[in-house]
Amino acid sequence: MTLFTSSHPANESTATGCTCSQDGPIKHLCVWLLRDALCPCCRGASRKTAKKKKTKTTESRASFSVINETRGFIYSVWTLSTLMVKLRARCLLVGDAAVGKTALSHMFHSDGTLFQKNYSMTTGVELLMKCVNIPETNNSVELYIIDSAGKQTLVEACEKMWGELSLLCLVFDLTSEQSFANCSHWMERVHAHCHGLHIPGVLVGNKSDLSARREVQVSVAQEWAQTQGLEYYETSAKEMENCDAPLLGLARAFHSLYQERRETIQNLSPA
Amino acid sequence: MIGSSQTLNSLGAKVVVASSCDESHPPENITDGNPHTFWMSTGMFPQEFIIRFAEPTKISAVTVDSYSVKHLKIDKNTSQNASQFESVTEKEFEHTEGHLQSNVISLNGSSATHLRFIITSGYDHFVSVHRVSVQD
Ligand SMILES: Nc1nc2c(ncn2[C@@H]2O[C@H](COP(=O)(O)OP(=O)(O)O)[C@@H](O)[C@H]2O)c(=O)[nH]1
Ligand SMILES: [Mg+2]
């Protein structure tokens, strides 16, 4: 009951949900129930409504319990929309050599929101940091993107640099059937590296500008992605087509995972 | 029984550094003595937090209530600043499902003004710490 305070209209036993719903009932209830303020659109008129309804006890009780039941949900909507969280994720960018990983990663920061870029020739791993805002929230995800060389001879050395991964961005070349077929090998490698920890990820078919040379059909790639639990995107690093979409997909996936885990933790019992 | 267990707030101890911050699950939740409130990491490892005591305090053991923590290292110092730590101990936690982990970690009665907790790995992407209490 901590969310209700004595001065709150909803605290009265006869209170009903406010009947106006200008901004949609959820947003309305968020403000009204949790802020200990007058209803923002009817300016407290709901209190009068409640008193008027005093005679219809059954109806008002019913509405009150609805408010009670939805409170938990409303509270989580409220915290998510107002309190800020910055998540951090280590994202592996991987796939065969020459599919366009490096070109893509350079597109990722073409909008000027890249804060840091280090290049390391010796290890064959490039690290980029990109901050992605989650739409309609105050939350953001800092993606630490590891562009790992795809050349067979370098893979072993590079894997040592992967570290503990949070996200996967698996890239193939839409004009190379072979690069698509090899995606399953990359998946195996990543799975083995992560020791059973589930890693949300995306599959990216790059070079969509070369439509005449396409060897992998959308439906085929889409279907395989689904079996792997990956979201599928097509991009052209050359034409700067759709390059931000996979990043937003990754950030959203990590954000939902965070929310899920937070929910789980909230419901844990003591040791 | 070794000494008595005290919540950190009652000792005037507080978290002065934390590597993650979700404003709805702030690091103060570690020291409030309540296992229902928690601090949550927001991604990647290692994660750490530093607890400062009001004065040098003799500690025989700490109890950590947490979730999904795999490996924890504890450092300490006796300085006024949160720097120049020496390592005290480390422990591998067992995985739990559906309920909190609770681990007692012996610190051998060493005196400290700061304790640094470094979570080097987890059983999941995110870990939580619900309560740290000390035995004197
Ligand atoms: N036509 C076209 N070429 C691309 C595209 N992306 C990358 N390339 C070219 O493919 C080659 C390999 O790209 P690179 O980014 O080095 O691949 P990586 O080995 O996966 O990092 C280069 O010649 C790029 O110019 C694309 O979207 N369209
Ligand atoms: Mg490259």
Image (cartoon, rainbow, N blue to C red):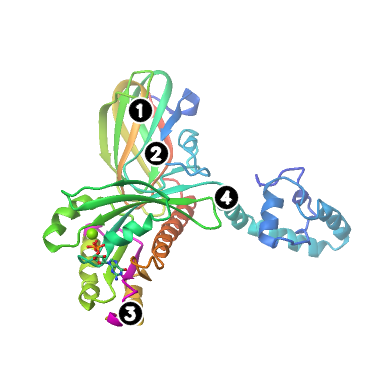
Q: From the viewer's perspective, is the residue at label 3 or at label 2 nearer?
A: 3
Residue B12: x and y in percent read: 48, 23
Q: CA distance from mark 3 to mark 2?
A: 46 Å
Cα–Cα gap, marks 3 and 4: 45 Å
Q: Are marks 3 and 4 in contact (CB under 8 Å)?
A: no
Instruction: Give yes or no for contact between labels 1 and 3 (Cβ–Cβ under 8 Å).
Output: no
Query: On the same chain: label 3 and label 4?
Result: yes
What are the residue bounds of the magenta stretch?
A193-214
Q: Which residue is mark 3?
A: A211
Label 4 element class: helix
* Mark 1, other Cα within 10 Å: few <14 / some 14–19 / many ≥20: many
Reading the chain from its start, which is encountered first: label 3 or label 4?
A: 4
- On whether disc 1 and disc 4 are found on a single subunit, the reply is no
Identify the residue at horizontal 38%, vertical 37% (top origin).
Answer: B64
What is the secondary structure assignment of the residue under circle 3?
helix
Residue A268 appears in view: no
Give neighbour class at mark 4: few <14, some 14-19, many 20+ (Cα, 10 Å): some
Amino acid beneath label 2: Ser
| Labels 1, 3: front one | 3
Q: Which mark is residue A79?
A: 4
Q: Is residue A210 in the magenta section?
A: yes
Tell me where residue B13 sits by quadrant: top left
Quadrant of image for the C terminus of chain A: top left
**Secondary element type, mark 2:** loop
Q: Do tag 1 and tag 2 residues touch (Cβ < 8 Å)?
A: no
Marks 1 and 2, how far apart at CA: 14 Å
- Pointer 2: what residue? B19
Residue that mark 1 sits on: B115
Q: Amino acid at mark 3?
A: Ser
Residue A101 sits above or below residue B121 on the image: below
Location of ligand 2 given as a quarter of the image: bottom left
